Amino acid sequence: MCGIFGIYGHDEAANLAYLGLHSLQHRGQESVGLVTHDASAFKRHVGMGLVSEAIDQPALDRLPGRAAIGQVRYSTSGASQIRNAQPFLFEYAHGGLAIAHNGNLVNAAELRGKLEADGSIFQTSSDTEVIVHLLARAREPDTISRLISALAQVTGSYSLVLLTESKLIAARDPNGFRPLVMGRLKDSFVFSSETSSFDLIEAEFIREIEPGEIVV
């Protein structure tokens, strides 16, 4: 199934994301990852296996910042390998961007074939990377417009959390195939596949992300 989690605006972002992913462990046991951003840079840590096995306190100490996204993975597309562990982190013409995905894109192979024919080089076998390439190739002037352009080309199920240098973005496919909920922890906003994450970190549930909605 995969579980995704995001938090924005908290000094303990990495620690809270760790707890959030721990509460989503039942959604995926193959790999786990976290990406954070502080005032200057992105930091990423991924590992195979369970949250408690792949992320220890020294790893969390190396993930500073007030924003974080993470994923526990169950592979519906792509092999169970470290290269497919999410969140993915990449640099493109508009800066850095991290992405974590729960879902399955049914036209991923077709899109990947077209992208590779145009010169794209893929680093993973995950269908999520198709979204990354579509984002990078989009000509729109801002991140949200580029994301809309990319998602308009994919078919299937997706709940996404994305982290830029200044924003946390959550998106859900137009059919609402995969769950995604929003909550609040004091002045911080959180997103998760399930409200169980909110219970563990004592966040307040606000609402579900609507099918086809993007929240920034």
Image: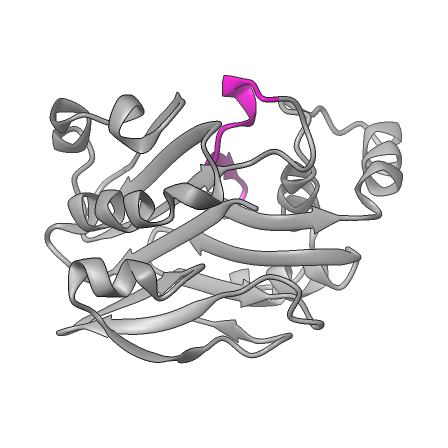
At horizontal 66% and vertical 47% (from top left) the residue drawn is 131
Residue 33 percent location from the top left of the image: 38, 34
The quadrant holding residue 115 is: top right
Q: In this rendered view, identify the residue nearer to me: 206 or 119.
A: 206
Is 115 placed left or right of 70 in the picture?
right
Residue 87 visible, this angle:
no
At horizontal 69% and vertical 34% (from top left) the residue drawn is 77
Residue 171 percent location from the top left of the image: 54, 65
Q: In this rendered view, identify the residue nearer to me: 91 or 174.
A: 174
Q: Is residue 84 magenta?
A: yes
Q: Give the residues in magenta.
A: 80-93
Residue 161 percent location from the top left of the image: 46, 55
Is 66 placed left or right of 166 in the picture?
left
The quadrant holding residue 98 is: top left
Residue 102 visible, this angle:
yes
Is residue 215 depicted above or below 127 in this figure? below
Quadrant for the C terminus, please: bottom left
